[in-house]
Image (tube, helix red, strand yellow):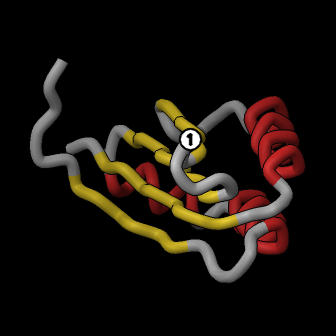
Amino acid sequence: MPFVQVVEYQTDRPDEVRRLSEEWTREHPSPGPARVTLAEDRDSPGHFVMVAEFDSYEQAMAHSGRPETGEYAERMRRLASGEPRYVNLEVAQQMA
């Protein structure tokens, strides 16, 4: 069953966040999320949401358990204002 992890955070360093995300994508192409979307709230500049889509919960947990994923999360945490908020979601239904 598909699984989605949402990471919500505030930052006043959006360019550094984008560079870090691009670096991660280049250096760690797989195994990882099937898709990652990074979005900024139009009504609240500096408020970001990252949505990582996985094929399964097990794949997401294996990815989260990798040392390099932990290093990336720590680097993101240092760029955030406050602690990021994580939401782990089992996909109940997908629509086209």
Is residue 67 visible to us here? no
**What kind of element bears circle 1?**
strand
Residue sticking out furthest to the front = 43
In this view of the protein, which residue sits in the foreground, 32 or 48?
48
Which quarter of the rendering shows the C terminus?
A: top left
Identify the residue shown where x is 74% and y is 34%.
25
Q: Give the camera-side residue of 6 and 68.
A: 6
Q: Residue beneath label 1, please?
A: 39
Q: Position of residue 10 (x, y in %)?
A: 66, 66
Which one is in front, 74 or 63?
74
State the image coordinates of residue 49 (x, y, percent, origin top left): 53, 52
Residue at image position (37%, 56%) is: 58
Residue 71, how many percent across, how many down?
A: 80, 66
For the point 11% across and 47% down, which residue is it?
92
Task: Return the x and y of residue 44 as percentages of the image width and height.
Answer: 57, 56
In the visual, does 51 lie left or right of 83?
left
Q: Residue furthest bottom?
A: 82
Q: From the image, which quarter does the N terminus lie in?
A: top left
How many dots with numbers?
1
Task: Give the camera-side residue of 2 and 12.
Answer: 12
Q: Quadrant location of residue 21?
A: top right
- Asked if residue 15 can be seen in this view, the reply is yes
Tell me what residue is drawn at x 33 percent, y 55 percent: 57
Amino acid type shown at disc 1: Ala
Crowdedness near tag 1: few (<14), some (14–19) or many (≥20) residues, C-alpha within 10 Å: few
Image position of 84 with respect to 39: above or below: below
